[in-house]
Image (tube, rainbow, N blue to C red):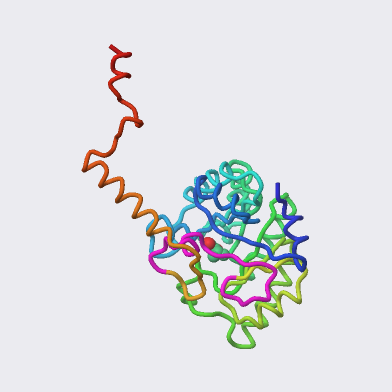
Amino acid sequence: MTTVRDVRAMAGNEQITMLTAYDAATADIVEEAGIDVVLVGDSMGNAVLGYDDTLPVTLDEVASRVGAVARGTDEALVVADMPFLSFGADPAESVENCGRMLKEEGANAVKLESGPHTVELTERLSDVGIPTMAHLGLTPQSVNQTGYTQQATDREEATEILELAEAHEAAGAFALVLEHVPANLAAQVTEAVEIPTIGIGAGGECDGQVLVFTDVVGLAESSPPFAAQFGDARAEIRDAVSDYVDAVRTGEFPAEEHGNTEDELDDLY
Ligand code: KIV
Ligand code: NA
């Protein structure tokens, strides 16, 4: 089993690979392919639940998917991404919601879209045994304030991210996602903190990279500019399903080897 200690120890030695998964079957494949950290991202909102953004994703939806991914993996570190408004308002409720992911669903850690409001919470979670991954830069739950554009393009914002990275490290975060920020800022943050930085649209100087599963395999309807496609699963799936449709329509399926042969009927009657 991969622990948060293992992930921390990888920083500076080998690149950490992180990818999202939202169900047991996919998590099994992702793990078999060698991914270190499986993130049950609230990107499930756009990726598989049919929402326009991540804001409507509920705690129950994430919990259900975290349980499935935890059951589908043996080795990888499973991180539950806490959805919009499940943390950050009321401290006790935040701890309870995060704790549910470990206690009831089998996650190993949680991720919080971070800001000044998550420093104390990160410390509290760390105190009670819930490892926390921070997330700075573009935080899509704040889309109504920031849009989806690159963040920290001026010195003031860059300084704020650097300070928040250090504050979350001091509060006990075990890793930090940096999303859609200038590569030189990501490099500077990576230098400034000891915990691993995991980048998405943040250049090549981070301690690891994360992407969304549907983008990587070619299942997404649309992808952000910094995503990369490494396969064409949409075409694979469409071809398999259309072959099935054809086989049923032509009577090629089911064939004898698929059961219901006359021999079986003789046995039955
Ligand atoms: O929800 C998600 O998939 C994420 C990653 C893109 C970091 O937060
Ligand atoms: Na997310």
Most extreme residue toward the left, as rendered? 250
Q: Position of residue 232 (x, y in %)?
A: 43, 62
Rendered residue at 42%/60% (across/down): 219
Q: Nearer the viewer, residue 5 or 208?
A: 208
Quarter of the rendering containing residue 115: bottom right
Reply yes or no: does residue 254 show up in magenta.
no
Most extreme residue toward the bottom, as rendered? 155
Q: How many marks?
A: 0
Rendered residue at 55%/73% (across/down): 138
Quarter of the rendering containing residue 185: bottom right
Reply yes or no: does residue 202 show up in magenta.
yes
Q: Position of residue 32 (x, y in %)?
A: 60, 50
Quadrant of the snapshot with the C terminus? top left
Q: Nearer the viewer, residue 221 or 193?
A: 221
Q: Position of residue 30 (x, y in %)?
A: 56, 53
Rendered residue at 52%/44% (across/down): 68
Q: Nearer the viewer, residue 7 or 178?
A: 7
Q: Which residues are magenta?
A: 200-222
Above or below residue 38? Residue 259 is above
Most extreme residue toward the top, as rendered? 269
Q: Position of residue 168 (x, y in %)?
A: 71, 67
Rendered residue at 76%/76% (across/down): 192
Quarter of the rendering containing residue 57: bottom left
